[in-house]
Amino acid sequence: METANVVVDSLAPSSEDTTREQLMDAAEVLFVEHGIENVSLRAIGRHAGQRNQSALQYHFENRDGLLDAILRRRMAQLERRRSQLVDEMLRKNSQPSLHDCTATLVRTPFSLCAEHQDFRDVFGLMGAHLLHLKDYVALLEKQNEEPSLHRIASVTLSHLADLPQELVMQRIEATQSSGFLAITQRARRRDSFTGIRAELFEHNLVDQLNGMLAAPVSEASKAALNKLRSNNTN
């Protein structure tokens, strides 16, 4: 019995972890209600029931540290859902199409927005905030380190094997940004993620993003690519 108690106690969250989660929960609620720039750290501490006003600085150092922690927590939530959907995709077809991959990427945040209002509100809020960051591209690169995205990327790249290498990452980055922007804008407006209109929005977005990836290379792009390659060899 004593051994079992030790195991249970070791798995229980520490008081520090609980405080950290409470502070992030409070920050999300206040940020959604008032906007990120209109909420003080002191107000977050009060909303979290923290009498010690230094608790937030202890756990996150400052506002940027708090925002980064919230972002990481939501990205972990996205990773868990995306991993499930990738598993489902590969069970249905060991060689999924490019459209299947794009649909899985879109379905990940879309389904979470449909199921969890708090995710929808925070996703819309953080999405608008992130799009104005100078290191937004760095954020995408950080997100691409997630295991489920590696799995999708390997399939996606196999479908783009005939595309000039210089264009592959440009298309992938543009597709990621466009999809991210479209879904965060819908979340920020608090439009529904369920029902016929939402279903049409989701499927049409998948079609658009798939078209961006698979679009034929125009003569103008080929000419520009030849100039680039020529300059690189000189």
Image (spheres, rainbow, N blue to C red):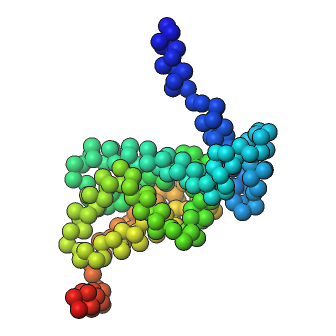
Tally of numbered discs: 0
Q: Quadrant of residue 96?
A: bottom left
At a point 43% along the width and 57% down the height, the residue shown is 143
Q: Position of residue 109 (x, y in %)?
A: 48, 54
At a point 56% along the width and 64% down the height, the residue shown is 130
Q: Position of residue 8 (x, y in %)?
A: 51, 20
Q: Nearer the viewer, residue 221 or 75?
A: 75
For the C terminus, the image quarter is bottom left
- Residue 211 visible? The answer is no
Q: Position of residue 126 (x, y in %)?
A: 59, 59
Q: Quadrant of residue 22?
A: top right
**Vertical side of 217 occupied by 14: above or below:** above
Judge from the rendering whether residue 51 lies leftward or rightward of residue 20; answer left or right.
right
Q: Quadrant of residue 37?
A: bottom right
Instruction: Looking at this view, name the residue that lies furthest to the top.
Output: 1
Judge from the rendering whether residue 187 lies leftward or rightward of residue 110; answer left or right.
right
Q: Nearer the viewer, residue 71 or 53?
A: 53
